[in-house]
Image: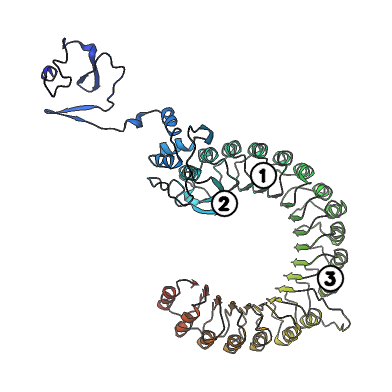
Amino acid sequence: MSKIIEFSGESDFCSGGSLLTKPKEASLFLTLGRHFDLYFPPSCKRARVSAPIVLQGNQIRTEKKASIDVLPDECLFEILRRLPGGRDRSACACVSKRWLMLASNISSDEFCCSTASVPPNSNDCHGHHGEVSGLSADEDMEDGFLSRTLEGKKVNDVRLAAIAIGTSSQGGLGKLIVRGNNSTRGLTSLGFRAIARCCPSLKTLSISNLSSIGDEGLLEIANGCSQLEKLDLNRCSSLSDRALVALAKNCPNLTDINIDSCPNLGNESLQSIGQYCPNLRSIAIKDCPRVGDQGVASLVSQAGRFLSKLKLQSLDVTDVSLAVVGHYGLAMTDLILTNLCNVGERGFCVVGNGHGLQKLRSVAVTSCQGLTDLGLEALANGCPNLKQICLRKCVHLSDSGLLSFAKAAASVDKLQLEECHRITQRGFLGLLIICGETLKSLSLINCLGLKDFAMGSPRLSSCSSLRSLCVRNCLGFGNSSLAMLGRLCPKLQHIEVSGSPGITDAGLLPLLENCDSGLVKVNFSKCTNLSDKVASAVARMHGWTLEVLNLEGCRKVSDASLLKIAENCPLLNDLDVSMTAITDCGVAALAEANYLNLQILSLSGCSQVSTKCLPSLKKLGNSLSGLNIQRCNGISRSSVDFLVEQLWRCDILY
């Protein structure tokens, strides 16, 4: 040690002589490491060397350490907020998790310099945590804004902070979707704080199945994202009214809200939405046990002048809520009511008699026992502009109510009845006659009350407006009903008669012959008694307009049908012959057609299709975008691999 202190010359630590006049003066030493002293002149205010120096033999080795890492968070925060551009901030965020979280907590108004503009397609940087702009997150541009989606194991604070930093320099995040939970490193309020600080332009937020997120996370969004327009909360069990009240107060631009299965959200939330969200246009509330009449009535009475879409499902509301809807829903165009067990007949009568739903165009009622014949008639009388109505599982609705509704709702052009078992052929045909000038689309699904019986009615006027007819899984629907339809509906273009084993060739042929406008979409799936005669008739009579043909499960359909299709259907783009009797020869006929331009072909469950049809499938693949060969046991695995390799532009199900 004494030799080092007495050393002088050109390589001295301090040239010009001895370092110390009094070598023993201990006050001029600063101890940086164990058993080693280093001299600093008295004028020095602080040490300029932060790394420890270690003596090894006759050499001095300095252990280098990034000095900036020893700075406290406050200093790093001041450094990061002074960076000149977004690219530099993204690069610094890649250094470590600590830097990332610090950078993501700097709000836009705290930066000393304006963020440099970076093209949306640029990749800012790559680091240990992945690309800061959101690596492994689904991304897209939507309405001019960036969109990000996080799901499952990707849902954590670090990834959300990375998205916040990366998108802040690319024009701002416009849409964020977060689904699922990470059981090991779950999302907390820190991730949403990063979004709130870095993405003030966020317009759409959708969170689903996030039990770890409580009020604090959404409070951060409420404080930082005042431009929020669309909010979707699904199965967020930890959220309470406190969070939604804050969002309503701080985000006046909210237009669309969906609340699904949030047990702690109640009336207070809806009251605040109605009070503070003047731009609200659509709201859906499902399975929230704390929501009652008080919340719904307050919401609709305050927002009814602008609210156009309302959905109430599985809520503990009564006739009072429907009365308020009928009176204050002045701007409402779409109304969906599902599983409202405490709403009775009086509620539906009042909603129609309130005369507030003058602009209502679409109604869907599902599993509401209060909808009776009288309630449906009142609804039709109170909604003069009603165009579309869907009734599902309305057990008290009968033919009388349906016919009364048809007489009152003169403007309805689309009607769907599902599992309304008291509707019979009388109501069905009466509806066609009464609404013959307006009804364009009619669907009957799982209506077991439809029983086939002959009705001699040659004087019945035709339903010239009907273009689309769907009769699905109505087991009693048969040939007599089809014959009547053939006489009543000559302008049909879309026909679905599926799941009806009582339908045969004799019933469908007259219907096909009377459709003088040309059929575009035809679905005869699971009509097991149909044969090549019907399929060939469709191709022969309507081949020049036919675009979609579904013969799934028609086991009597064979190669003869495919030959007619290949000859007569140049516009056909979607063909389903799954579980039929076709063979390799039928597929070859399709491949040899001169004008056929199929885009989707389904051969699922065709046991007689084998590897021999590979050349035909390859040829069809020039136009195909979708091919289904599932459960085709005659096609070997190696043949499937060959097809996948050759038809790389086609999605193949196997």
Q: CA distance from mark 2 to mark 3?
A: 44 Å
Mark 3, other Cα within 10 Å: few <14 / some 14–19 / many ≥20: many
- Which residue is rendered at x = 27% and y = 25% of the image? 49
Q: Nearer the viewer, residue 492 or 243?
A: 492
Mark 1–mark 2 contact, CB under 8 Å?
A: no
Numbered circle sitting on residue 435: 3
Disc 3 residue type? Answer: Cys
Residue type beneath disc 1:
Leu
The Cα atoms of the two marked residues, 3 and 1, are separated by 40 Å
Q: Please report whichever mark, 2 or 3, sits nearer to the chain's N-terminal start.
A: 2
In the displayed structure image, the side of residue 113 where residue 456 appears, left or right: right
**Which quarter of the figure has residue 7?**
top left
- Crowding at dot 1, Cα within 10 Å, few <14 / some 14-19 / many 20+, comes out as many
Q: Check the image and report above or below for 460 versus 161.
A: below
Q: Nearer the viewer, mark 1 or mark 2?
A: 2
Q: Residue at x 66, y 79 (%)?
A: 524
Residue at 68 percent of width and 47 percent of height: 255
Q: Say which label, 3 or 1, has the lower sequence index.
A: 1
Marks 2/3 in contact by CB < 8 Å: the verdict is no
| Residue with the mark numbered 2 | 144
